Image: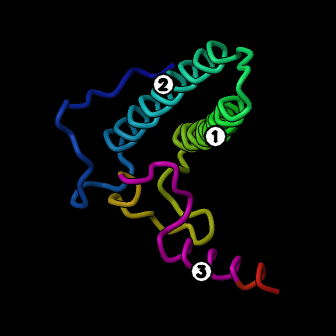
């Protein structure tokens, strides 16, 4: 296991430094791990809440409302689960030295985009092209 990279607390990746240097990679690694921990904590809270609410409600309207809330929680939980797998994939890309580069074009993804969406796998332009193509095929 390699030694941990020193990262000042107020560090932010900058355009004037080498792209995906050790500090930038460590910054995104920590950001992704913190996001994953946050999602996992929310997931644990959701599961506890669902277990607490698993009770027999005699009123039909109350039961329907509770079932709707439960379905919404489960949908949210499923989205979070998918997000955690995307975070894990981003962490693997960091370890493989592929993080920060577009999977379509191989070009660097902007630091602003990665800071806002660290699981991004495409440049903004490639993502827009992909979504346009997806829309066209969906309409057919």
Q: Helix or strand or loop: what does disc 2 sit on?
A: helix
Measuring 64% from the left and 20% from the top, which residue is drawn there? 50
Give the residue displayed 53% in from the left and 45% down from the top: 97
Residue situated in front as seen by the camera: 32 or 100: 32
- Does the magenta segment cover residue 139? no
Give how far across and how far down residue 67 sits, in percent: 71, 33
x 82%, y 86%: residue: 140
* Label 2, label 3: how far apart the Cα atoms are: 32 Å
Q: Position of residue 101 (x, y in %)?
A: 51, 59
Q: Secondary structure at mark 3?
A: helix
The quarter holding residue 6 reads: top left
Dot 2 corresponds to which residue? Answer: 37
Q: Earlier in the sequence, mark 3 or mark 1?
A: 1
Circles 2 and 1, Cβ within 8 Å, touching? The answer is no
Mark 1 Cα-neighbour bin, 10 Å: few <14, some 14–19, many ≥20: few
Q: Which residue is mark 3?
A: 129
**Coloring applied to the structure:** rainbow
Q: Is residue 2 left or right of residue 55?
A: left
Residue extending furthest right? Answer: 140
Mark 3 vs mark 1, CA separation in Å? 32 Å
Q: Position of residue 119 (x, y in %)?
A: 52, 49
Residue 55 drawn at (x, y percent): 71, 14
Magenta region: which residues? 116-135
Check disc 1 and report the residue beneath it.
72
User: Does the magenta-highlighted stretch encompass residue 124?
Assistant: yes
Q: Residues within 10 Å of mark 3 (few under 14, many from 20)?
A: few
Q: Is residue 43 above or below residue 109?
A: above
Q: Please indicate whether residue 17 sits to the left or right of residue 98 in the image.
A: left
Q: Residues within 10 Å of mark 2 (few under 14, many from 20)?
A: few
């Amino acid at each position: 296991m390699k030694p941990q990279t020193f990262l000042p607390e107020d560090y932010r990746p900058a355009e004037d430094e080498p792209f995906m240097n050790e500090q930038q990679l460590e910054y995104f690694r920590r950001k992704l791990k913190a996001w994953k921990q946050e999602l996992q904590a929310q997931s644990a809270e959701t599961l506890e809440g669902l277990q607490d609410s698993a009770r027999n409600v005699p009123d039909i309207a109350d039961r329907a409302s509770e079932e709707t809330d439960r379905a919404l929680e489960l949908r949210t939980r499923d989205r979070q689960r998918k997000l955690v797998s995307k975070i894990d994939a981003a962490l693997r890309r960091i370890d493989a030295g592929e993080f920060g580069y577009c999977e379509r074009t191989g070009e660097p993804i902007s630091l602003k985009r990665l800071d806002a969406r660290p699981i991004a796998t495409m440049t903004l332009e490639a993502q827009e092209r992909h979504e346009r193509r997806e829309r066209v095929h969906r309409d057919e």
